[in-house]
Every structure is written in C-alpha cells, then in structure tokens.
Amino acid sequence: MSNRLEGKKVLLTGASGGIGTATALLFAREGADLCLVDLRKEELSKVAIQCRALGVKALDIPTDITDKTQVEGMAQASIGAFNKIDILINNAGYGKYGPFTAIPIEEWDRMWLVNVRGTVLVTQSIVPSMISAKNGHIVNISSIHGIRASANASAYCATKFAITGLTEALSIELWKDGIKVSTICPGGVLTPFLGILPEEKTPDFLEPEEVAEVILDIVTAPGKALVQHVVVVPRNRPYVPLEIK
C-alpha cells in the first residue's frame, strides 16, 4: 500500500461489520491509527486485533452513540490516546423498511436516535478539537435514500435526508475553521443490512471494500480540494438499494 494515511488519527463508528470493518482494515493498511466504535464489543475487538496486526494502533471502544455520557467518554479516551482526531467517519446506522402505516413509532425513534442523534453527538464531541487544530475531515455516511425517496422506506429516508442536510450545513459552517465535511450516499451494498444476508442479495450490489475505497479517495483529496458529496451505486443497478415491497 501507499501509506496515504500515515500519521493520521481516525475515529470510525459502526466499525464492527460491513462498510465499517472494510474501511477500518483499508485505513489500517494505509497507515492510519484508529479509534473503532460500535455497540458490539466482541466483534469490535476482533476488528481492532486485525488492524493492530497491520502495524497500526487501534483502540476499540464499545459505545452506545445515542448516549451522550458514553459518547463524551469515548471522545475523551480517543483524543487522550491520540492527542487529536484528523478524520471522523460517522458510519453507524440502523434501518427498518415497511409501509408507513406499519412501522411502529418505536422503530422511527430508534432510526432517529442512531442515524441522526448518534451522528450529531459524536460530531459535537470531536469538532471542538478539530476547530482548535484548524484541521480535520468529517465524512458522514448517508445513503442513496438520503437523496432519493422510495416507497416503504419513509422513516429511513427521513433520517438519511437529515444527514445529507446536516452535512451540507456543516460544510459551509466549518470551512472557515479548516475542516472539510463530506457525505457519501451508497446504493446497494453486500452487508447484512436490514437483516438480509449478503448471499441473499443480488451479486450486482457493491462490495463493502469498494465503498471503503471511495471513502479513502474522499479523505485523501489534495489540499483545499473538497469532495463534498458522492453517490456510489452498483453500475448495473443504479438507484436501486433494495427491492422494497
């Protein structure tokens, strides 16, 4: 590898599987030290061990990103260990599809808590240190459903449209502080999202590693260049994240 991230300190949520794990391993191969965050303690530990085997530092900090106290503790541990966070990747997410009249309010609440509140809490905990350093890059993982609505995905679309809007606003607000803010909107990806196993999905979908490569390209854009908004979809099935019924 080219060690494009040597010396960089990266905080990654949703690191225990799918796009998160693929990104953690790719960034480790590129030389980044990592703070890996997820609820799933055992799975998270395994990813951290794999990253450390690649010769970088990797903290695994199990955290409920919807809990303000836990997030603040995680941020203090991360910044305390690395003295800074250069790149924050808000990848953790949760989704539930179904007819609007059939999705209980508890599922709406969970999606808002994880997808929106969690992203806001983690970002709020890290941004002050980036402002002090006058440097940083935040990448929010939205979805094709953050720019294009589908039937039977109203709650998920609402949360991901919120992330897209949040990203655009922060990009304008934080530019003066030397902080880049980007969003990536993946289409169908071969992960266990929605409880559907990768092998049960169409093979046309993206591999998590392909999405991770796009994230790497975003955070290694040169100098003042900002890749503000990226849509990455399977070339044979653009704009079709799942067959939603």
Image: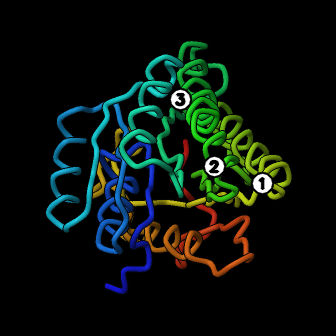
Up-down: is 36 above or below 219? Answer: above
Decide which of 37, 7 is in the foreground and name it.
7
Place of residue 39 in the rendered image (x, y in percent of width and height, measured from the top left): 33, 30
Asked if disc 1 and disc 2 are in contact, CB closer than 8 Å, the reply is yes
Of labels 1 and 3, the one closer to you: 1
Asked which secondary structure carries label 1, the reply is: helix
Query: Is residue 194 something one can see in this rendering?
Result: no
User: Mark 1 and mark 3: span between their CA atoms?
Assistant: 27 Å
Asked which secondary structure carries label 2, the reply is: helix
Label 3: few (<14), some or many (≥20) within 10 Å? Answer: many
Asked if disc 1 and disc 3 are in contact, CB closer than 8 Å, the reply is no
Q: Is residue 200 left or right of residue 161?
A: left
Quarter of the picture holding the N terminus:
bottom left
**What's the residue type where badge 1 is placed?**
Asp
Asked if disc 2 and disc 3 are in contact, CB closer than 8 Å, the reply is no
Is tag 2's residue or tag 3's residue first in the polypeptide sequence? 3
Is tag 1's residue or tag 3's residue first in the polypeptide sequence? 3
Up-down: is 65 above or below 219? Answer: above
**What's the residue type where badge 2 is placed?**
Met
Please give the name of the residue rendered at 52% of the width and 72% of the height, measured from the top-left corner.
214
Residue under pointer 1: 177
Please give the name of the residue rendered at 85% of the width and 54% of the height, measured from the top-left corner.
172
Query: Is residue 12 something one can see in this rendering?
Result: yes
Residue under pointer 3: 114
Decide which of 140, 245 is in the foreground and name it.
140
Residue under pointer 2: 130
